[in-house]
Image (cartoon, rainbow, N blue to C red):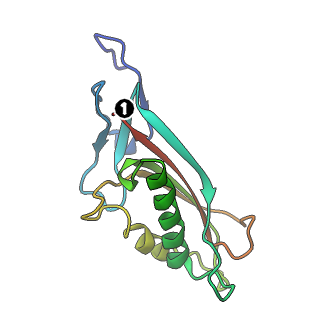
Amino acid sequence: MIKFSKPVSIILLTSVLGIAAVASAAEIVRTGEGRNFYNNIMIPAGAETLYLSGSGAQALPDGSWGDMEQQTINTFSRFKETLESQGWSMEDIVQVRAFAVAGADGELDFAGFNSGYQQFFGTDENPMKPVRSFVQIAGLVVPGWLVEIEIRAARMPK
């Protein structure tokens, strides 16, 4: 059990391999640099949070949906627009949950998801890498979707 000399309220979004860090009251702490796709993140009390509901790609002009990579890019592009319209950024994302189904060939395209994901996280433009989950499920509510993604964002008040 960790004891603090002063009351501290911290939400631990994930703890991979038992790694933990203590956040100060003034910052969001990201640990685990060097991992390919994600960090461990601790959010202190007082942080502003924003939750965006599960969303998927929009159909292409020809009515098709595209492959996993295209759908991932489309979905994160739409999240980026929504965040920016509210004064937030992709750097504020602390958690990504993705629910995916196999394509017409019966295979789950995890590599396609990662390829699309890497265009938004761990880049020069956005070096942040959120905590993430990727879960294969039997089906999604929108026919044609291969992935549905939800996000959580957090930042310290300005």
Return the residue at label 1: 157
Residue visible at 35% across and 34% down in the picture: 156
> Up-down: is 48 above or below 135?
above
Residue visible at 71% across and 65% down in the picture: 140
> Up-down: is 101 above or below 106?
above
**Residue 132 in view here:** no
Residue type of the residue flagged with mark 1: Pro
Q: Residues within 10 Å of mark 1 (few under 14, many from 20)?
A: few
- Residue nearest the viewer, comparing 80 with 36: 80
Quadrant in which the C terminus is drawn:
top left
Q: Secondary structure at mark 1?
A: loop
Quadrant in which the N terminus is drawn:
top left
Q: Name the quadrant containing residue 124.
A: bottom left
Expressed as whole percent of the image width and height from the top left, the position of residue 110 reads 50, 72
Expressed as whole percent of the image width and height from the top left, the position of residue 77 reads 48, 67
> Up-down: is 109 above or below 123?
below
- Residue nearest the viewer, comparing 3 with 114: 114
Residue visible at 51% across and 42% down in the picture: 50
- Residue nearest the viewer, comparing 139 with 70: 70
- Residue nearest the viewer, comparing 16 with 152: 152
Residue visible at 39% across and 34% down in the picture: 43
Expressed as whole percent of the image width and height from the top left, the position of residue 57 reads 60, 70
Expressed as whole percent of the image width and height from the top left, the position of residue 41 reads 36, 41
